[in-house]
Image: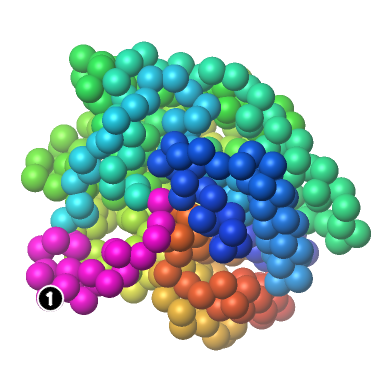
Amino acid sequence: MQRSEQRFLTTHAGSLPRSAELRDLLIRVSRREPVNSAALERAIEESTRRVIAAQLAAGIDVGNNGEQPRESFFTYVQHRMSGFSGSSTRPVMRDIVRYPTFLQLKLPDFSRSMVNLMSAPQATSEVRYLDEGPVAKECDDFARLLAAHEARFVETFVTAPSPGIVACAMQNVHYASLEDYVRALADALRTEYEAIAARGFVLQIDCPDLAMERHTLFADRPLEDFLAFVDVVVAAIDGALAGVPRDRVRIHVCWGNYEGPHDSDVALEEVLPRLQALRAGAFMLALANPRHAHEHRALRRFPVAADQLVVAGVIDTTTNYVEHPEVVAERIERVVEAVGDPHRVLAGTDCGFDTAAGLGDVAEDVVWLKLRALRDGADLASRRLL
């Protein structure tokens, strides 16, 4: 994985705005409704071309395909794996439902057209990865579209979900326990993890479960139960990564990519020591939003290994405020001070901008402004520290 040698490298967490046509098609795909396959392929390709060009124009160094072929960052697995049908009843994040006036304020947003992550399919039979073909096609299409650009990313990545987020949001009615379900999912996802890495991309594993489930599935249970779940997921991911080089894996952890109180979030210092058991070359952490901007300090108390990188979230993906480059630079500088080595810090976003089709909180025009601010702020910090 590339370090920040001459300048602070910039990246983001994966999902980028989809075109309106693609959004509508993917919403139908998520519901298993019939769609015109040629129209879907055309919309995916056009939207992927657009986000590649927009990332390069914004100055992103480590880019991806914006997750354009996927309906969301995790429910797409229902189309690549066996065992899913029906509908889950996902617990709502505790901080959303505990304040009635907040919920009332947000009700118009909840009614918009989007992929519904709260009622994803259930695991009703054995979960198995059916065919490497779809992930191979996604990677190969991305590589082909990249080759058409004269400009180049310094490095590229492709995302895949943690078995833990799939297990928590796509509920289990087949396996004897949540732990058995997580392990089965990890065994299945191994195919996807290895396929992405084998094609030369950095593998980013999205693990909101390793923080967000404290105030979701485990909201009414002791902290120790949640931390035990974290240990199960970490062990399962490590097993699935046995065939992937450690320095080609980055782990993204957040507390849920939504604008809300977040006053039920678990502290980073509670989970960071457990995350460090993962076979990973980098940790991508949400450090820009108002609830967690102070937690760069946890990296002093629990430093990452000398050969590991920190991708610092310095852009909030839930607000249409465009961060001033000086704010971005200051956030980078704080993380560098905590890590102790500027070359091991990259500048990124807290999460994605369109984690499920239609779910993004930030206007598309503003997304590209935020990524430009990320570049400008990283340049300021580079002049001061590198």
Secondary structure of the magenta portion, mostly?
helix
Q: Residue at x 69, y 76 (%)?
A: 379
Q: Residue at x 59, y 77 (%)?
A: 365
Q: Residue at x 21, y 54 (%)?
A: 93
Quadrant containing the C terminus in the rendered view:
bottom right
Residue 245 visible somewhere in the drawing:
no
- Residue 328 position, x and y percent, is 54, 77
The reply to whether the magenta stretch includes residue 106 is yes
Name the residue tied to disc 1. 101
- Residue 126 position, x and y percent, is 36, 14
Who is closer to the viewer here, 197 or 30? 30
Few, some or many residues within 10 Å of mark 1 (<14, 14–19, 20+): few
Q: On screen, 162 above or below 11?
A: above
Q: Residue at x 10, y 41 (%)?
A: 222
The reply to whether the magenta stretch includes residue 338 is no
Callout count: 1
Magenta part of the chain = 95-115
Q: On screen, 198 above or below 107?
A: above
Furthest toward the right, the residue is 150
- Residue 249 position, x and y percent, is 58, 38
- Residue 260 position, x and y percent, is 26, 68
Amino acid type for the residue under numbered disc 1: Thr
Write down the quadrant of residue 300 in the picture. bottom left
Secondary structure at badge 1 equals helix
